[in-house]
Image (cartoon, rainbow, N blue to C red):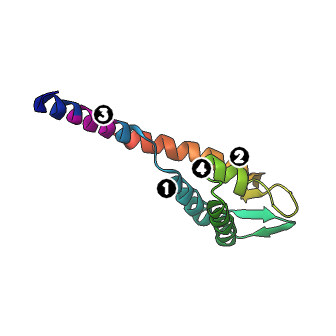
């Protein structure tokens, strides 16, 4: 293969990988970081193991679970984090809940809806 062809093949591979990177959604860690920030800034209450907690305590708790799951290599996506870390108590298996004003819902549904909203906003901002 001539040097020109090698150059063209290398250029095509490079351009192809650049396009693929531009189309990828935000990384799981960025998405999870957003979800945790969204929770802590929401002012909503977080229910776990029979007690309501403020949003900062909720973030601290879920962040601790996230770090544990990372050490166990159990989180590859934001959905993994929601399913494994933010759905229920690993002690009592009681579902986590979020209450914003009078509206109460499972934390899994609340975070999943925010993840969808975040991804949509990210794709709307992409060129």
Alpha-carbon span between mark 3 and mark 1? 24 Å
**Left or right of residue 19, residue 94 in this image:** right
Of marks 4 and 1, which one's residue comes earlier in the chain? Answer: 1
From the viewer's perspective, is the residue at label 3 or at label 1 nearer?
3
User: Does the magenta-highlighted stretch encompass residue 14?
Assistant: yes
Residue identified by numbered label 1: 30
Alpha-carbon span between mark 3 and mark 2? 36 Å
Residue at position x 81%, y 61% in the image: 90
- Callout 2: SS: helix
Residue 109, which numbered label? 2
Residue at position x 26%, y 38% in the image: 14
Dominant SS of magenta comes to helix
**Left or right of residue 80, residue 16 in this image:** left
Q: Please name whichever residue, 125 or 80, is drawn nearer the observer in this view of the structure.
A: 80
**Left or right of residue 73, residue 102 in this image:** right
Q: Is residue 127 visible?
A: no
Q: Which residues are magenta?
A: 10-19
Of marks 1 and 2, which one's residue comes earlier in the chain? Answer: 1
**If the image is split into quadrants, where does the N terminus sit?**
top left
User: Does the magenta-highlighted stretch encompass residue 54?
Assistant: no
Q: Please name whichever residue, 34 or 12, is drawn nearer the observer in this view of the structure.
A: 12
Q: How many marks?
A: 4
Alpha-carbon span between mark 4 and mark 1? 9 Å
Alpha-carbon span between mark 4 and mark 3? 26 Å
Residue 78, which numbered label? 4
Residue identified by numbered label 3: 16
């Amino acid at each position: 293969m001539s040097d020109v062809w090698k150059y063209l093949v290398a250029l095509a591979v490079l351009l192809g990988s650049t396009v693929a990177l531009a189309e990828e959604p935000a990384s799981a860690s960025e998405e999870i970081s957003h979800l945790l920030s969204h929770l802590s800034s929401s002012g909503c209450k977080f229910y776990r193991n029979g007690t309501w907690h403020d949003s900062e305590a909720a973030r601290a708790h879920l962040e601790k679970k996230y770090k544990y799951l990372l050490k166990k290599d159990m989180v590859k996506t934001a959905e993994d984090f929601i399913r494994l870390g933010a759905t229920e108590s690993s002690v009592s298996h009681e579902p986590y809940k979020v209450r914003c004003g009078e509206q109460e819902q499972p934390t899994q549904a609340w975070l999943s809806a925010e993840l969808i909203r975040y991804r949509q906003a990210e794709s709307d901002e992409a060129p």
